[in-house]
Every structure is written in C-alpha cells, then in structure tokens.
Image: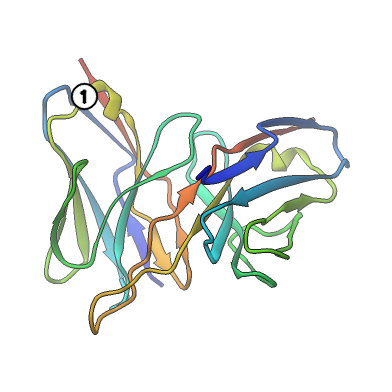
Amino acid sequence: LAKTTQPISMDSYEGQEVNITCSHNNIATNDYITWYQQFPSQGPRFIIQGYKTKVTNEVASLFIPADRKSSTLSLPRVSLSDTAVYYCPRQGAQKLVFGQGTRLTINP
Amino acid sequence: NAGVTQTPKFRILKIGQSMTLQCTQDMNHNYMYWYRQDPGMGLKLIYYSVGAGITDKGEVPNGYNVSRSTTEDFPLRLELAAPSQTSVYFCASRSTGPGLAGGPVSYNEQFFGPGTRLTVL
C-alpha cells in the first residue's frame, strides 16, 4: 500500500533555506507528487507539483530523484510568514490522502 | 470567481441534532471532496465525488452522508451529531489535469474552502 512519510516538525530561522523531505513508499508509476501548505485556521493551499527531476515556481522548488521514492520541497530564504504545516499527500485513485504533515516553525 | 465557499463558518450542535454543511464551487470542477481536521492533526477524507450523481466513501465516512445533484454543490449531512464529530470541516474541488504527452494525467491542484468549525456538545 502506497504511503508518504515526512518529519513531524522542523525549526529554522529567517533567511535560511529550508528543505523538507517526504518518502513515497510504493508510489505508482502514474502518480504525481504534490505539496500543500496550511496556515492556522485556513484550508490547505497548493504549492507545487512534479513528476520527476526538478520543478521550480515563484514559491518553492521540488526535487524528485530518478527512482521517485522521495521528494524534497525547498523553500529559499524563509521568513516568519512561512511558518505553517506542509503536506506531501499520497495520490490515491481520484483523491489525495493527507497525513499529519510537517509543522515548520520559522524563528526570528 | 469566488472559488470554494462553505457555510456556515461556525456551528454548535447538541448531541443528536442534525445539520447540513454547505459547499459550493464556481469553477466548474468535476471533483469535490470533504475532509475533517481534528486539532493538531492532518486532514482525513470523509467523502468525495467525481461528478454530479456520483459519490464515494473516503477514510472516515461513518456518521455522514453526501449528495451531488449539481456540479456546483456538494453538501455534507450529519444525521445524529456526536461529540466525536467536533472538528473543522473543509470542502475542496479540482479539475482533471491535462497530463504529459504520452504520460500520466496530472493531478490538478485542489482548491480548498475556508472551513466550517463544528462543535458538538
């Protein structure tokens, strides 16, 4: 059964680059890898999606190795406003299955 | 576009009462989802729909019912409220991705509503 695993929490400081890694156990050939961000009292928000190699947008970069068994979300030069929970949900048939996510805290 | 809207924002129910959480999207998305999120936890899928007239169970469907009579609306019904249903409920929708040439269909982003905070006492 496919599942994703990520750290429960991480801490960093303003201006640093933060990398959050997710393992994708038994990821299916046709599955994309997506990441979501959730601020307190809000619904999750899509950040980035990729299938393989590297994807970059205005918010983050996503690194996916050739074997696709893991992915790394990279947030450059974080600020206090990047404090949030980050999810790498498992893609099931027609739906996403969210785990507990990684609670990222950015300190001044 | 308003995106995904949910009503009400807050609600307090007594044990055994019933209510319907409303969800509407104006993006003409085929797929719609209901999640619940308990304090400090991740999201758990309750029900989802791939189009009008088609619904299916998620991870935690017990105690809930859904219907999808139109593309826009996906209401969630609680028949006999229990304290275990105290949670924040999120509705989401998405369209089908265009896919890579010759490759898998991409899973387009899910748009989430602002949530309904429900307390059952």
Q: Position of residue A47 (x, y in %)?
A: 30, 47
Name the residue located 11 percent from the left edge and 34 percent from the top edge. Answer: A17
Check the image and name the residue furthest to the right: B16
- Disc 1 is placed on an element classified as loop
Please report the residue visible at 30 percent of the width from the left and 78 percent of the height from the top.
B104
Q: Is residue B27 left or right of residue B100?
A: right
Q: Chain of mark 1?
A: A
Quadrant in the rendering for residue A44: top left
Residue placed most toward the observer, A77 or B102: B102
Q: Nearer the viewer, residue B30 or A37?
A: B30
Spot occupied by residue A81 in the image (x, y as percentages of width and height): 29, 24
| Quadrant in which residue A25 is drawn | bottom left
Q: Image height check: is A26 above or below B39?
A: below
Is B64 left or right of B90, judged from the image as shown? right
Q: Which residue is mark 1?
A: A79
Relative placement, left or right, of A39 versus B72 is left
Whether residue A42 is situated above or below residue A72 in the rendered picture? above
Which amino acid, by three-letter code, is at mark 1?
A: Ser
